[in-house]
Amino acid sequence: MPKLVARQNVAVTPDPQLRRSLRLALLCGLALVILLPMARGSSEWLGWLPMWLVGMPAIALWSLHRFRLPLGKAATAGLAPRRRRPGTQARRRAIPSSQRLSRAA
């Protein structure tokens, strides 16, 4: 069985040319959707146009940054993540025989 190798936390920056072109595509698509009513519709060949003009460049830009979520207040304040409570998992209790429901006919 292969051994698992831990990843090193290396900050990999995306290609600036690709990032710039994706931002440009996103801003152009957003401007088209806002300014042109035809860009808010649907095409027979492409489908729903706002998805292709705004959604897909936004997802591509997000995936370029390796799906990092924006940092919230808790992450910027340096708070530790919440840990699980100690102990074992709770078990179900057996139903006493006097409380069982009667069977239907």
Image (cartoon, rainbow, N blue to C red):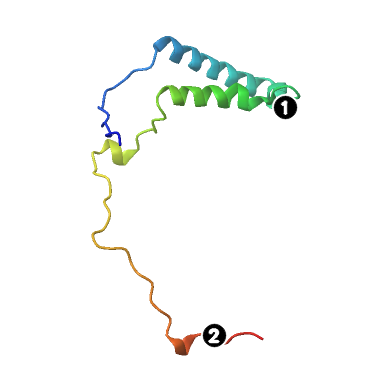
- The quarter of the displayed image where residue 88 is located: bottom left
Q: Secondary structure at mark 2?
A: loop
Closest to the observer, 37 or 11:
11
Q: Position of residue 14 (x, y in %)?
A: 38, 17
Closest to the observer, 31 or 58:
58
Residue 101 badge? 2
Quarter of the image with the C terminus is bottom right
Taking the view exactly as shown, the residue that stands out farthest to the top is 17
* Residue count near mark 2 (Cα–Cα under 10 Å), binned few <14, some 14–19, many ≥20: few
Closest to the observer, 74 or 44:
44
Residue drawn at x 50%, y 16% as measured from the top left: 22
Q: Position of residue 35 (x, y in %)?
A: 65, 20
Q: Is residue 12 left or right of residue 40?
A: left
Q: Are marks 1 and 2 in contact (CB under 8 Å)?
A: no
**Count of numbered badges drawn on the protein:** 2
Residue drawn at x 72%, y 27% as measured from the top left: 42
Question: For the residue marked with disc 2, what is the amino acid?
Answer: Leu
Taking the view exactly as shown, the residue that stands out farthest to the bottom is 98
Closest to the observer, 89 or 65:
89
Residue 20 badge? none
Q: Is residue 32 left or right of residue 24?
A: right
Q: Choose mark 1 or mark 2, whichever is in front.
A: 2
Q: Position of residue 84 (x, y in %)?
A: 28, 54
**Looking at the image, residue 17 lies above or below residue 69:** above
- Mark earlier in primary sequence (1, 2): 1
Question: For the residue marked with disc 1, what is the amino acid?
Answer: Ser
Q: State the residue position of label 1.
A: 42
